[in-house]
Image (cartoon, rainbow, N blue to C red):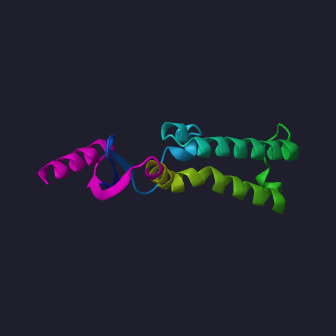
Amino acid sequence: MSSYKIFKHPEKGYEAVKSGFAWFAPFNPVWPLFRGLWTVFISYIFVIIFLASIDFKIYGFDLIDITNANNLQWILLIIQFVIFASPGFKGNEWTATNLQKKGYIFDCSIEANNKDEALTFANISKTKE
């Protein structure tokens, strides 16, 4: 089971955001678009293009030769791994913040197997009140 944060909007109802690592985010650069995170998507694309241009300047069409890499190349490689992994670590937090900007208010946390189950539990618990 996973923990989900439940957000309530006065007109739109409930939304659930999983707590923890967003597994699809680091492997899919368009992931922020599915969450309505336009500024994250645009920033991420610009950073990827910038890093790719640095890589092209250093390596051309070749790949990094890890056995012969110098310190600058190692530092750039580590920075790239951190940047590519950051949406996984911060993605669900960015989604929750985006919902709050749209008028959603944090309601509760629920343990559930998936997002739909978390929303069902939220709706059931609110109808009992």
Report whether 27 appears left or right of 68: left
Q: Residue at x 15, y 48 (%)?
A: 127
Q: Residue at x 82, y 63 (%)?
A: 71
Quarter of the image with the C terminus in it: bottom left
Tally the numbered discs: 0
Comparing 63 with 80, the one in front is 80
- In x, y percent, where is residue 85? 59, 53
In the image, is residue 85 part of the stretch drawn in magenta?
no
Comparing 96 with 111, the one in front is 96
Report whether 87 appears left or right of 128: right
Report whether 88 appears left or right of 59: left
- In x, y percent, where is residue 35? 48, 41
Q: Looking at the rendering, which quadrant does residue 4 occupy?
A: bottom left
User: Where does the magenta region start and end?
Assistant: 100-129
Comparing 93 with 127, the one in front is 127
Q: Looking at the rendering, which quadrant does residue 32 occupy?
A: top right
- In x, y percent, where is residue 2? 33, 55
Q: Residue at x 51, y 51 (%)?
A: 91
